[in-house]
Amino acid sequence: MLSRTADHLYWMARYTERAENLARLLDVSYQMSLVPQSVASQNQNWGAILALNSLEATFARSYAEVNVDNVLRFMVSDANNPSSIYSCLRAARENAHAVRGTLTSEMWESVNATWIELRQQSFEQINLGGVSEFFDWVKLRSSVIRGVTFGTMLKDDALHFIRLGGLLERGDNTARILDMQYHILRQNDDEGASDFYQWGALLRSLSAFQVYRKVYRDAITPARVAELLILCQEMPRSLHSCADGIVRMLQLIANGASAETERRAGVLHARLHFARIEDVLADGLHGYLTDFMDRIYELGDGISQSFLMPA
């Protein structure tokens, strides 16, 4: 496969997954903002979203104050923010258009229809209709694209690069969501009704609430939430599950230049496969997740050099 074709497929998947995970992060933050708290605390939590994505300076150029309305507008529909849902779905569509001949017609129509529907909505319309409903729409459209991809694409290198991009982005974003929300919730941990609501909101944001109930059949505790989202191999959005898939995809597309990238993926997978949540928490969850995100970034660089750069 030509490296530029692989590059477009890989980034199409990453941008689609990024839009979905951003919707998940914003949705859980919005749901938690409905719990009684001071305005200063609420704005601090919204500022954490900007810091998590290294967007403080970009935000400050257009908005005077960090608050729920400004951050939502910036992260949802601001075309000048390269990391907004609007920009991500636009980039996904542009990458899909560049390799339209490689995609099935059903897949192209799914990506294109998502973009067309999004660009017809202003932030005011989204806000009026309910931001949570909009976030559900983004998650649904991502699921539709993913389902059409798996249901219609030939199981060849094109699908493997799509899958690889999605898994890399999903692992990185799960770590980001967990890192930010776990820190906030542990600070506010009162073991009361609101605490249960907020931990439940975090699990729901990653489609993990019912899975948690099935796996643990017990009260929601911070340690078990972390264990499910980091180490549970059967949980689709866990870091372990994403690392599993990354290793498999790299094995399927391996070439003469990819040995070091495969080794790094294997090391990351082994760290997750043999880890225990007690050790992770004892050493510090933030440090563990930061190290994971650094390793994902290095893997992205390795994939780019091994597969996506023209020889």
Image (cartoon, grey):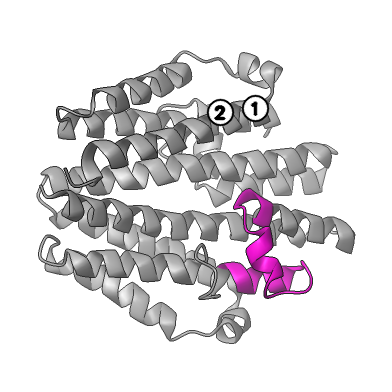
For the point 64% across and 15% down, which residue is it?
278
The amino acid at mark 1 is Gly
Q: Element type at marker 1?
A: helix
Residue bearing the label numbered 1: 287
The one nearer the camera, 86 or 184, is: 86
Which residue is at a point 63% across and 14% down the rendered structure image?
Answer: 279
For this rendering, which residue is in front, 119 or 204? 119
Task: Report the magenta residues as a range.
Answer: 50-75
In magenta segment, residue 68: yes
- Counting other residues with Cα less than 10 Å from the Cα at mark 1, is it few (<14), some (14-19), or many (20 or more)? few
The answer to whether one can see residue 133 in this image is no
The reply to whether the magenta stretch includes residue 67 is: yes
| Camera-nearest residue between 154 and 172 | 172
Q: Is residue 179 left or right of residue 105?
A: right
Mark linked to residue 291: 2
Q: Are marks 2 and 1 in contact (CB under 8 Å)?
A: yes
